[in-house]
Image: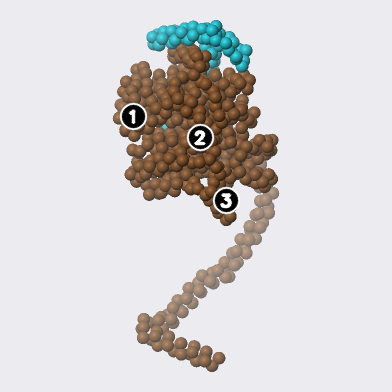
Chain colours: A brown, B cyan
Amino acid sequence: MSVIIHPSVIGILFGLFIFIFYRRILNYLAFFVSVLIFLYCLNLQEGVYNYLTIFNYDFYIKVDKLSLFFCYVFSLIGMVGILYSLHEDNRLVPGPALIYMSSAIGVTLSYDLISFYAFWEMLAFTAILLIISSRTKEAYFSTVRYAIIHAVSGLCLLLGMLYLFTHYDIKSVATFSDIRGTLPYYLILLAVLINAAMPPLHFWLPDSYSNASIYGSVFLSVFTTKSAVYALLRMFPGEPIISVAGALMALYGVIYATLENNPRRLLSYLIVSQVGFMVCGAGLGSQEALNGASAHAFAHIIYDGVLFMSAGAVIYSTGLERLHLLGGYARRNPWVALYFFVGALSISGLPLTSGFVSKSITIHSAADLHKPLEYLLMELASVGTFFSIVMRMGFNIFFGEPKSNYEVKPIPWNMHAAMFIASFLCILIGILPSYFYKLLPYPEHFIPYTFTNVVNSLSLFSVAALIYFLVAKIIAPKPIINLDTEWFFIKLSRAFVYLLNKILVPSEYRYVGEFYRFLVDKMLVRVREVLVIMNYIYLRKVATEVPQKVYDLSIKTAKFYDGNMLKYLQFLLIFLAILLTVMILI
Amino acid sequence: MLNKQFRREILIALLIVVLMFILSLYDYLVHEHHHAFSFENIPFFTGLLGIIGALFITVVVKILEKIVSRGEDSYERYYTS
């Protein structure tokens, strides 16, 4: 078995160093390390490698086409994200981002379940640092909610793993279809679906991503959900429940996105929707569907990066984070508008963009497998995506008249560079799909650019645009917030507290308390009486007499310890002479 | 129903829709297709799906807004920055 240096170890060690000894200059070190990790990932060869041995337990990584595919894009977007935040003086961004990226790479490369679990937990922990990087009260509360839901995910994963170890002797990350229907299977599936933000357990995503710093949210939008997609593709391909659930998730996300007024919450709901496509692809389970899910994850990571970066650029330059306050931004900064629309058209899946060549595979595979429900739901979600991001968010931020008097601050070069690189990649993948398909885990022969596909796609979106312009006033952004499934959890926890206060506490006081009061009172009175006697007899004596004796002793010893060194030496010699004599006599 | 603010945009979008309709009819008549579902044989099916989808989303969003939307100050917890 070959031994290898784990690429994540490099990122974690440097990330820790940068976090602990943070200076702004170390942002450049973080960028350099991210480039190094990207190049290292590009040079990884397929195979199983040992990277660590502790107490005779070997930790492995497995490099195959699926893990490599995710490694490439994780390291690439990590590098672009660090470039985007290069000017920012914030301890909680470059170091944690590097560790976060390394953890995601670690998840994709893990071959043994312990490594997988360790990187999974590290992913949650570093995400918390990135959420709190904005250092606001809202971010703090989001962090708490994020930590709770991911603790549940981590616990489910741990329990599932322990069950696998003890009952099935499974210790490696592989397809779990053989143990379908068992408890550990569903525990691990639940853990993965929480991280994939499957409704109704998705509320942590829009909550935390919108409250993180603009730099933090670029990283957050990429790694956690897509690591979960990788886990689904690796462990649960062909799971029928998740194919329909994924398609529903895709539609759910766009409906909430269309309702949103906060650009980053809108984008977060679109993550839920786009991950739905991937989950559906994983659930469909054919090689083409798995390719579709992988391709879509890759493309999504890049265009989602562009969208979060351009939304962040708008927030950075205007200080505003509400659609109903913005407008006309394209006249002030046309470059950001260009980057945004490249990302927005990509996420919608318009021809010549990465979304078109990736999303079409999953939809095509649903048609090939004759799954009309999944097919129609995904097509509807595509309409909704275009409707919510290109039309609603794009037009309300970049076109029309400004709805408030906002100033526009210039954007640093590194933010421009990062957005340009990611936008360029969106177009590059869109116009050269054959090269992109060669990287996919399985052989792919799908041809996206047929006359029918292009006309169908353009028909779908032109009609959606027409409808939007007709109903634009009806769905115009308003200063509102929207309750989501967290409402049920809030109500549930309140009901629990109410139950405790109104029912359990009085009944405990009335019945259980009455019963115990007799015993406790009697016992406590007796104990008190004993303690009082002990206090009077012993403690009082000790408290008064011991200090007096210590004082008397100190007076006597003070006569001896008078500070005369010669006398000390004399006594020491006498003592040694006596000791020597005794030893000789014995 | 016509939104006067977007009159120009509506016209452009309408022209593209008409063009796509013609192209899809051409595609329907000229090319031989092997569709997975029978509903895909309807001419300009994706355009119709786009109309239904966009209207469906608009209606659902308006209904949902009545149920789940609140004023920004009305929510008691520290929700969003």
Residue displayed at 41% across by 8% down: B11
Tell me: residue A483, above or below residue A401: below
Residue type at numbered disc 2: Phe
Q: A348 above or below A529?
A: above
Q: Which mark is residue A210?
A: none
Name the amino acid, label 1: Ser
Mark 3 residue type: Asp
Q: Compare marks 3 and 2 and give the one earlier in the sequence.
A: 3
x, y (%) of residue B64?
Answer: 53, 20
The image quadrant where one finds the C terminus of chain B is: top left
Residue ID for mark 1: A317
Task: Out of A10 and A384, give the one closest to the viewer.
Answer: A10
| Along the line of sight, the residue nearer the viewer: A272 or A561 | A272
Q: Report, in whole angstroms, how far the alpha carbon at label 3 lies from the one at label 2.
A: 25 Å
Q: Residues at marks 1 and 2, common chain?
A: yes
The answer for which chain carries disc 2 is: A
User: Residue beneath label 2, please?
Assistant: A69
Q: Quadrant of residue A487?
A: top right
Q: Quadrant of residue A398?
A: top left
Residue A58, label in figure: 3
